[in-house]
Every structure is written in structure tokens, then in C-alpha cells.
Image (tube, rainbow, N blue to C red):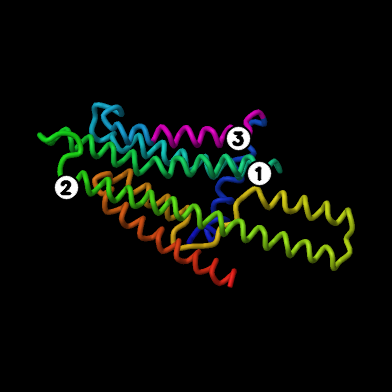
Amino acid sequence: MFDLPLRPLKDTIFTPLCAYIPSSIKPLHITLLAFISGLISCYFLAFPSSTSLQPSTTTTLPLVFWILNRALDCLDGALARHRGTASELGGFLDLLGDFIVYSLLPISIAYGTALSLSSSSVLGYGAGREGDGIWLAVAVLEATFHVNNFVLFYVAALVEKAGADSKGQKADSDGKGEDGGKRDKERRRKELTSVSMRPAVIEGFESGVIFTLMIMLPNWIELLSWMMAGLVAVGIGQRTVWVVVALS
């Protein structure tokens, strides 16, 4: 919902930093570092006792690596655009890393919370309705992710196809010839560096906020998972309506 309005602010923050990054560091290197940071955050969330002997750090370290993941995720794209090296491969790997971390993060929090419950329960791991409720909420959330991803990329395919058809028709009507066709192909190649996404009530920014709350308040994972699942379901509905209207 706020991704497009906040994009100029993101560029204002991260684009100037690109001038200080050595040329030996490529955007894909930053993408990899972002992915690793996300995995480290998930590890500390799943095994909170491994962070430190101090209870206060059980959320600090995962939060630090999560924020690092988000910052690097913004920086890799800014660097690629700054250097003119944006590519389909870079966009694919960036989204792949995001989706993996997004999927693992609520599971990791639920697992870490379940471990805490089991340590205080005489009935064993995952005992009690509270543990079951957490896993049910996370399972529903993951299911909405799965459905949303299908709708998201089907919409992206429709948008790309419509753009390609309109460009082809314009090229024919203008009589551009072979050179014009090459220019159209190059323009399409550049547009494919990121996936076209229809706006919805929850996008990257909103997801990041909710995930941050999950990390800071792991005991609220059940409530936050239900809330996020509801918002994702609304987004699925919004994009489904768009598809139905577009194809009718």
C-alpha cells in the first residue's frame, strides 16, 4: 500500500551510499549478504537461547540482523540502478531470497516460542492449546503466502503480456522496422528487472512492519499471524478482482 509512495524516500536514502561502495563489490554480493543476514535472524529466532545468556538479547540480535537484511535488500537494487547493471538474474535472486526469509521468519518465531513453552510445561514439547494455536495461526499465514504468490505472479504475467502486446502494436503502426524492434526488445529487457505488482493493502513495507513486530514481540506471534493472514487475504481479493475485471 505504501511501497510506491515511499520509493522516492528509499532512493534518497540509499542512492547516495552507492558512491562509497568499492567497485569490487557487486549488487549480487549485497543480495547474498542480505539473504545470509535474514537466515541468521531466523536462526536466532528459532533458537533464542543461543543468542546470549542475557534474556534481553533474545530479540535484539534477531532484530539487528533483520534490519540489516532489509537495509541490504534496498541497497542492492539502488547499487544496480546506480551502476546501470540491473539484470533479470539480480531481480530473480533478490525476490527468491526475500520469499525464503519471509517464509522462514514466522516459522522460526513459532518454533522458538514453542521451545519456550515446552521448557515450562510438564507435558512436553508443544503442549497445551497455546502451542497448538500458534502453529495453526502460522500455518494459515503460510497458506495465504502461497496463494498470494500465485495471484501475484499471475498478475505480473498479465501486466507483462499486456505491455508486450501494446508495444508490438505501436511498433507496427509506427513502422519502426528492425531497429525499432530491437529498441522495444531492449526496453522490455530492462523492465523485466523487477516484477510488476498490483498495489494491495499489504505489500513489502507493511510486511516488514509486521515481521518487525513479530521479532520484537514473539509472544504475540499468534495474534500477529492471524492479523497478517487477514491482510494478505484482503490483498488476494483485491488482486483477484483486478484479474477478473481485466479478463472479462
Q: Which residue is mark 3?
A: 28
Residue 150 appears left or right of 218? right
Amino acid tagged 3: Leu
Please identify the quarter of the rendering in which residue 162 is found.
bottom right
Circle 3 crowding by C-alpha within 10 Å: few under 14, some 14–19, many from 20: some
Considering the numbered disc 2 on the image, is that residue within a helix, a strand or a loop? helix
Front-most of residues 146 and 37: 146
Mark 1 and mark 2: span between their CA atoms? 46 Å
- Which label is found at residue 88? 1
Counting from the top left corner in percent of width and height, residue 181 is at 83, 55
In the image, 234: left or right of 170?
left
User: Is residue 207 depicted above or below 75 in this figure?
Assistant: below
Where is residue 44 drawn, in percent x and y? 34, 32
Secondary structure at badge 3 equals helix
Upstream in sequence: badge 2 or badge 3: 3
Identity of the residue drawn at 89% across and 64% down:
175
- Extreme residue toward the left, this view: 122
Of mark 1 and mark 2, the one earlier in the sequence is: 1
- Above or below residue 29? Residue 173 is below
The mark closer to the camera, 2 or 3, is 2
Pick the residue in front: 236 or 18.
236
The residue lying at 64 percent from left, 40 percent from top is 89
Which of the marked residues, 3 or 1, is nearer the chain's N terminus?
Answer: 3
Provide the residue designation for mark 2: 129
Q: Position of residue 37 (x, y in %)?
A: 45, 34
What residue span does the magenta drawing correspond to?
24-41
Q: Nearer the viewer, residue 145 or 59?
A: 145
Name the amino acid, label 1: Glu
User: Mark 3 or mark 1, which is nearer to you?
Assistant: 1
